[in-house]
């Protein structure tokens, strides 16, 4: 079962085959299905607008050729009032199209955004190792907005324009066949120009999106790290990085607007030629008596009814390219391989906590092996510690137990059951994780603790807070458990954040506990307070501890020294000291000054 998702570069344009394009269209149409009623009402309104549009030139021709020469003023007034009523109806129809049509696009955009969010929640760790948060956010906001515009204006523009072109062409043919054919002969020039410029415009729009995603990623990174930036007075460096992305965006925008300029100016020139052709050819026909003055006037009025929808279709290419590239980028996220349970996977139930690694190897990338033939046996309820140099593979071992990554070879067993045979959700419900880098949500104290058990009662939340030694502090706050802690818990100290995360795990109450450098970033006094809470948390649970401070794991049942992806020493604290190996050197190095004192 592969958990690698999104290995392709999201910023690189891909030339799709006809089959892939058809698949893309089917996926897009799928989002119309829940809104079929609104879609057909919108399209019906569009058809009526097109039909009303042809009434004016018909009435103009009738007045010039018949009613005015016959001085039938009564019919002139009646037709004028009728035309006014139709225009009022057209106004209401246009309101409906603009309001409800755009809302249909919004509904589809919201559904796509929900689908993308749900899919992002299912993607494996490996996906987020290769994709920046800001770029993902750009796809969910900027890209999907353009997709919603296409969802609304696409069918509407096509239906109105095609219908208007057919009706106007038929009507113009009824006025004068040869003059109509002369005008129609100019249309291929528009098509050729549009087609030749379309590809460049599409590439320019994709480059612009990529540049905008880079800016979002840079901005998100800079704002998240603003406190570090201020502490190191590196505002100029952050500005330099941001301006680099801004510069690329300006270049991409310059290219896109240049492509748009060529596209629109070329098409506008050809449409202007239409008017010249009508003026000269129509004047020649009128001079030779091949067309009446009323018909000629109606033809001049009606030609805009023909050219207008043609230009609408051509100009639609801009929003079409925007929407298509946006939907392609949306599909790239949706096509990333999600985490999936194996076909044979079953719910884990309540695990007891016996963990086994059997000759496990792992590599984040094909050419970078992180773990090499690791074998471990951690008994139920035991406290097992991992120590060793940074980058040796300790955290990777921790990430493999909840199946955040797939092993390259070997097996990991919990209570004798291979983790691939357990559903991911049921497996992870049995595991609690406390890390050095704690993530807290911009919410209240209560909701951050409740994250460990969404259906927890108030009494359970308070009990978890007490056991984590954070309840007394919470009660000193003006709003108590309703106090908002800010983004990533910015209003809390490091120790308070850690105790809040411990309260979450108390509430979850898992049989397996992973402590990954849980106290390494704390001062000695705070560490003692946190350690007391952790010691209580570990009681009755199988605990895997990653630590640099060896004082925190001296009492572990067993300790393994991990270096370069291998277990190089293993035993109790006393046994490892007697071996006089790497562990003894690490221990002596850490406690040399203290022993001297």
Image: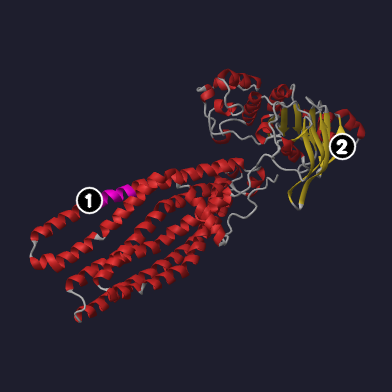
- First in sequence: mark 2 or mark 1? 1
Q: Which residues are magenta?
A: 87-97
Please give the label number shown on residue 308.
none
Image-quadrant location for residue 279:
bottom left
Q: Is residue 31 above or below residue 12?
A: above
Residue 139 counted in the magenta span: no
In this rendering, the answer to whether 557 lies above or below 305 is above
Please say whether residue 522 is visible from this viewpoint. Answer: no
Question: Position of 584 compared to 442: left or right?
Answer: right
Quadrant of the rendering where the N terminus is positioned: top right
Residue at x 18%, y 74% (from the top left corner): 292
Residue 184's spot in the image, x, y percent? 34, 72
* Mark 2 lies on residue: 569
- The Cα atoms of the two marked residues, 2 and 1, are separated by 86 Å
Q: What residue sits 80% from the left and 34% below the top?
A: 356
Q: Residues within 10 Å of mark 2 (few under 14, many from 20)?
A: some
Nearer the observer, 451 or 77: 77
265 relative to 121 in the view: left or right: left
Residue bearing the label numbered 1:
88
Q: Please, what is the dominant secondary structure of the magenta stretch?
A: helix
Q: Which quarter of the picture shows residue 474?
A: top right
């Amino acid at each position: 079962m592969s958990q690698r998702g999104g290995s392709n570069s999201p910023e690189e344009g891909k030339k799709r085959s006809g089959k892939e394009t058809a698949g893309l269209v089917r996926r897009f149409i799928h989002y119309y299905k829940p809104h079929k009623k609104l879609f057909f009402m919108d399209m019906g309104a569009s058809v009526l607008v097109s039909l009303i549009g042809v009434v004016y030139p018909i009435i103009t021709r009738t007045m010039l050729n018949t009613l005015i020469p016959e001085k039938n003023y009564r019919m002139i007034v009646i037709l004028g009032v009728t035309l006014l009523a139709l225009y009022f109806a057209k106004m209401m129809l246009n309101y409906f199209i603009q309001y409800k049509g755009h809302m249909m696009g919004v509904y589809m955009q919201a559904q796509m955004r929900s689908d993308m969010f749900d899919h992002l929640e299912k993607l494996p760790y490996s996906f987020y190792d290769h994709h920046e948060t800001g770029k993902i956010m750009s796809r969910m906001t900027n890209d999907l907005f353009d997709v919603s515009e296409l969802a609304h204006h696409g069918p509407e523009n096509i239906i109105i324009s095609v219908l208007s072109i057919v009706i106007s062409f038929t009507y113009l043919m009824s006025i004068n066949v040869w003059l109509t054919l002369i005008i129609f002969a100019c249309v291929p020039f528009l098509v050729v120009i549009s087609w030749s410029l379309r590809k460049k415009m599409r590439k320019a729009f994709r480059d612009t999106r990529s540049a905008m995603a880079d800016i979002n990623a840079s901005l998100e990174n800079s704002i998240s790290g603003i406190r570090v930036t201020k502490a190191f007075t590196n505002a100029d460096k952050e500005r330099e990085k941001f301006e680099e992305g801004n510069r690329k965006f300006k270049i991409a925008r310059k290219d896109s607007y240049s492509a748009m300029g060529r596209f629109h100016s070329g098409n506008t020139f050809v449409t202007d030629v239409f008017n010249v052709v009508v003026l000269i050819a129509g004047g020649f026909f009128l001079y030779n008596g091949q067309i009446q003055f009323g018909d000629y006037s109606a033809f001049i009025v009606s030609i805009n009814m023909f050219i207008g929808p043609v230009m609408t279709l051509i100009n639609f290419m801009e929003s079409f390219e925007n929407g298509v590239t946006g939907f392609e980028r949306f599909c790239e996220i949706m096509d990333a391989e999600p985490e999936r349970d194996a076909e044979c996977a079953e719910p884990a139930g309540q695990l007891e906590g016996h963990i086994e690694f059997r000759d496990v190897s792992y590599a984040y990338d094909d050419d970078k092996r992180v773990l090499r033939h690791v074998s471990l046996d951690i008994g139920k309820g035991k406290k097992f510690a991992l120590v060793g140099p940074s980058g040796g593979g300790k955290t990777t071992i921790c990430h493999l137990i909840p199946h955040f990554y797939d092993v390259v070879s070997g097996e990991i067993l919990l209570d004798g059951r291979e983790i691939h045979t357990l559903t991911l959700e049921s497996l992870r419900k049995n595991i609690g994780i406390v890390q050095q880098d704690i993530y807290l949500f911009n919410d209240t104290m209560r909701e951050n603790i409740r994250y460990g058990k969404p259906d927890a009662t108030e009494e359970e939340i308070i009990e978890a807070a007490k056991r984590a030694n954070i309840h007394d502090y919470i009660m000193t706050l003006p709003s108590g458990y309703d106090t908002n802690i800010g983004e990533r818990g910015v209003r809390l100290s490091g120790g308070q954040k850690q105790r809040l995360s411990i309260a979450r795990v108390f509430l979850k109450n898992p049989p397996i506990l992973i402590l990954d450098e849980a106290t390494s970033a704390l001062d000695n006094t705070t560490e003692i307070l946190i350690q007391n809470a952790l010691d209580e948390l570990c009681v009755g649970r199988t605990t895997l501890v990653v630590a640099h401070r060896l004082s925190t794991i001296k009492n572990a049942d067993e300790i393994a020294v991990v270096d370069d992806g291998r277990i190089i020493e293993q035993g109790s604290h006393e046994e490892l000291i007697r071996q006089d190996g790497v562990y003894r050197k690490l221990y002596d190095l850490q406690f040399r000054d203290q022993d001297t004192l």
